[in-house]
Amino acid sequence: MSFTRQLSEMSASELNDAIDDTNFPQAHILSRGRNNSVCSTSSTSGTSSLADRPQPQTEQSTAIAGTPVEEVAPASTLVPVSGNQRPRLILKTNGSSPDSDGTQPKTPMTPRTSTTPGSGHEKCTFHHDLELDHKPPTREALLPDMARSYRLLLGGLGENPDRQGLIKTPERAAKAMLYFTKGYDQSLEDVLNGAVFDEDHDEMVVVKDIEMFSMCEHHLVPFYGKVSIGYLPCNKILGLSKLARIVEIFARRLQVQERLTKQIAVAVTQAVQPAGVAVVVEGVHMCMVMRGVQKINSKTVTSTMLGVFRDDPKTREEFLNLVNSK
């Protein structure tokens, strides 16, 4: 009897026993149902194939680790209210948070691979099968690795990282970069801290010339300037200092000015649901001043108009006149 004929007459279990997969660890998992991961979801018998096992269901579609999922930028709509009040501007986020409106790049996250009740990892948001520590590191814990990277950078520039003036430069540079990007550690809820007040006021509120410092994500060099914010309240006002703090949340990240402008407007909308929000940002980019075209007097102006400011030319003109007045 030929070898092929022998194989054709074997049962599935006999074929599994006949396969010599000692040099292929993954074959053990596929052919015999073994699972050497930290959080096993295999059956108790250990003989079921992966195809026969129930697949975990999640509320959102999963993606391969490191692969971004297509996002939909939030739309906005004006919700009418009773009486003579202005309609409120409400964002339609389709399940995503308004401060991540599709224009902000997200850090790819591996989806949870174990949602089986009782597995102990139902609430694990940074779950990897082969990790023992399921908590993301704090930013301060990144300082040693960042300092080593800066030290390599100094050496690549032809400098001596061990000379007196540069001995502590890698650590100082790492701490400075964490400060420049501290907005990643801040959320809108933390910054507002309940400073949203009920007030019978529906006239324009404008805070202008808020200083802004950020980092260009294309060249990792600074850009700076000023931000002006206006909104039309619907019986809710925001503490004035909170507008400046909202600017800090998004400016203290790797940014482009266009995205920064929109993120500020969306955050104000989320905070107080006004009838409209307007944001104007004027910036000087060191990537245009120190390198490239080297145009030292150039400025970049971007704006985002939402709600009434977009729909009503007179309201928009009033805001722009207030912003441009000295």
Image (cartoon, rainbow, N blue to C red):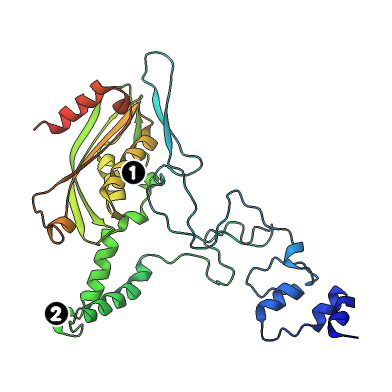
Q: Position of residue 311 (x, y in %)?
A: 32, 24
Instruction: Rate crowding at label 2 as few (under 14), some (14 to 19) or many (20 or more) other CA atoms within 10 Å.
Output: few
Secondary structure beneath dot 2 equals helix
Q: Are marks 1 and 2 in contact (CB under 8 Å)?
A: no
209, above or below 175, in the image: above
> For mark 2, what is the residue?
165
Query: Disc 1 or 2, which lies upstream in sequence?
Result: 2
273 vs 326, left or right, is: right
> For mark 1, what is the residue?
263
188 vs 135, left or right, is: left
Q: Position of residue 234 (x, y in %)?
A: 36, 24
Q: Residue at x 31, y 32 (%)?
A: 277
Of 40 and 13, nearer the camera is 13
| Marks 1 and 2, how far apart at CA | 40 Å
Secondary structure beneath dot 1 equals helix
Occupied quadrant, residue 264: top left
Give the number of the mark in front: 1 or 2. 1
Name which residue type carries label 1. Answer: Gln
Of 92 and 236, nearer the camera is 92
Instruction: Rate crowding at label 1 as few (under 14), some (14 to 19) or many (20 or more) other CA atoms within 10 Å.
Output: many
Q: Quadrant of the N terminus?
A: bottom right
- Disc count in the image? 2
Q: Residue at x 56, y 67 (%)?
A: 128
Q: Quadrant of the C terminus?
A: top left
Name which residue type carries label 2. Answer: Gly
